[in-house]
Image (spheres, helix red, strand yellow):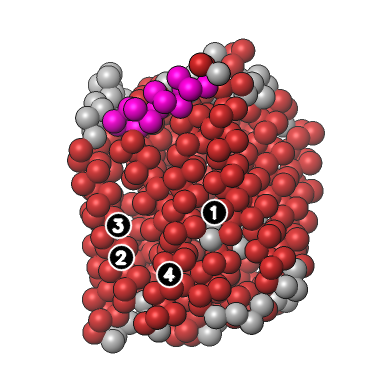
């Protein structure tokens, strides 16, 4: 009992952890609100699922292009300054869309451009933030710290979509949404400025930046645990692009308006809150990180399949609730495995490979857009969920890295 209280109380009492928690919570809320609002806007302007897919693709291309460089830069420069710059650029990108909306001259390419800018800044922010998190809490409390982070993330996933749905329902436009996003990212920039943790690398890098990038990739490949985790991450992100299409499913399949659309998009966030509380209290007991990661991934696939087959709004809401619960096992262990299985001086670079895996996986919006045009959005989700199940079984059989006890090797 004392052990649990000490772990959680000491985390929440840590000033720098609270700021990192706040930044992550607001950022997650803002990003999902941005994706939802951008998808809604593009669909209203074009009526095309393929054009909706380009909202995610724009973000993905920027993430893939910059993630490795962002990680290498994070191991050289002050991570606090990198985070501040990333959020300032994010606020400016949302301000650009807000201006075009206010002037009544909004076009789809404006949204694609803003998504690309935000995707690029996410690479810099996430790689530096993950490295700082490990520096603030250490390896023993990492799972608990990430789990508590996900409580905040999940609260953001609930609040963000609800705000988007409510604001669009009231105003019948997205001006208020993008004004809110500008405020979100500007506030995050201020929080990054207030961090007191030393964000500079302890050892001055002597290698060229491209050699530093290569070192990070080499370590990620040579570690069985990291290699298996990144492979599963790519597969999950390629075949798990459902959030972009919630506006289409809500309007055409479930026949509900923007308000209920926002509520539906928040369902997985509600599930994540429950999962995060469980993981937060039991995190220090976990030894088999890879097994929880794999089981969480399988639960996600089953939930996605159920969501794609659901003909009723209540059932769709319930399946996304379960999806959010399983998401915690996947996402918490994903970051924990990657950080615990790598040396501290490589953390930003290894986080860069993680961002590349996430970004490369999100090229699945192209695959999802094509299948949605060929069949339907729900049909495409069913195909992808079944593919995930088969590939996860293959990973478990042929990539034993997920079966390792990381604590015994550190």
Q: Which residues are magenta?
A: 4-17
Give residue 148's position: percent from left, percent from top: 47, 36
Q: Main secondary structure of the magenta part?
A: helix
Q: What residue is drawn where x is 44% and y is 80%?
A: 169
219 left or right of 127 in image: right
SS assignment at label 1: helix
Mark before the other along the chain sequence, 2 or 1: 2
Q: What residue is drawn where x is 28% and y is 49%?
A: 188
Q: CA distance from mark 2 to mark 1?
A: 19 Å
Check if residue 80 falls in the magenta segment: no
Q: Which residue is mark 1?
A: 269
Q: Which residue is mark 4?
A: 164
Looking at the image, do the residues carrying marks 3 and 4 touch, with CB atoms under 8 Å apart?
no
Depth check: give the residue in front, 75 or 297.
Answer: 297
What label does residue 180 carry, if any? 2
Q: CA distance from mark 3 to mark 4?
A: 13 Å
Q: Which residue is mark 3?
A: 184
Looking at the image, do the residues carrying marks 2 and 3 touch, with CB atoms under 8 Å apart?
yes
Mark before the other along the chain sequence, 1 or 4: 4
């Amino acid at each position: 009992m004392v052990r649990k209280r000490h772990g959680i109380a000491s985390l929440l009492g840590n000033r720098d952890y609270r700021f990192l928690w706040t930044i992550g919570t607001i950022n997650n809320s803002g990003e999902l609100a941005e994706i939802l609002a951008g998808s809604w806007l593009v669909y209203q302007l074009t009526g095309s699922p393929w054009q909706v897919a380009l909202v995610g693709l724009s973000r993905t291309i920027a993430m893939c292009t910059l993630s490795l460089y962002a990680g290498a830069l994070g191991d050289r420069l002050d991570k606090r300054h990198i985070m501040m710059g990333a959020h300032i650029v994010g606020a400016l990108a949302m301000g650009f869309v807000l201006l075009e909306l206010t002037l009544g001259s909004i076009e789809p390419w404006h949204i694609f451009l803003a998504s690309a800018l935000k995707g690029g800044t996410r690479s810099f922010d996430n790689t530096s933030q993950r490295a700082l998190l490990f520096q603030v809490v250490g390896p023993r409390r990492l799972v608990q710290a990430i789990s508590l982070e996900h409580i905040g993330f999940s609260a953001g996933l609930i609040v963000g979509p609800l705000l988007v749905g409510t604001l669009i329902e009231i105003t019948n436009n997205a001006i208020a949404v993008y004004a809110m996003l500008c405020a979100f990212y500007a506030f995050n920039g201020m929080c990054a400025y207030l961090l007191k943790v030393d964000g500079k690398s302890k050892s001055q890098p002597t290698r060229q930046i491209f050699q530093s990038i290569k070192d990070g990739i080499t370590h990620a490949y040579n570690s069985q645990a990291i290699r298996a985790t990144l492979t599963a991450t790519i597969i999950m992100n390629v075949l798990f692009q459902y959030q972009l299409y919630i506006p289409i499913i809500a309007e055409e399949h479930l026949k509900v308006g923007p308000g209920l659309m926002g509520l539906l998009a928040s369902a997985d966030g509600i599930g994540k809150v429950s999962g995060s509380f469980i993981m937060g209290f039991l995190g220090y007991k976990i030894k088999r990180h890879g097994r929880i990661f794999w089981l969480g991934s399988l639960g996600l696939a089953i939930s996605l399949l159920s969501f794609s087959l659901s003909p009723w709004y209540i059932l769709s809401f319930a399946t996304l609730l379960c999806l959010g619960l399983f998401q915690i096992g996947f996402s918490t262990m994903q970051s924990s495995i990657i950080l615990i299985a790598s040396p501290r001086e490589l953390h930003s670079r290894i986080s860069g490979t993680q961002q590349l895996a996430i970004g490369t996986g999100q090229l699945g919006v192209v695959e999802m857009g094509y299948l949605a045009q060929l069949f339907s959005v729900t049909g495409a989700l069913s195909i992808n969920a079944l593919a995930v199940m088969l590939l996860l079984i293959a990973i478990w059989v042929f990539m034993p890295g997920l079966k390792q006890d990381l604590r015994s090797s550190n």
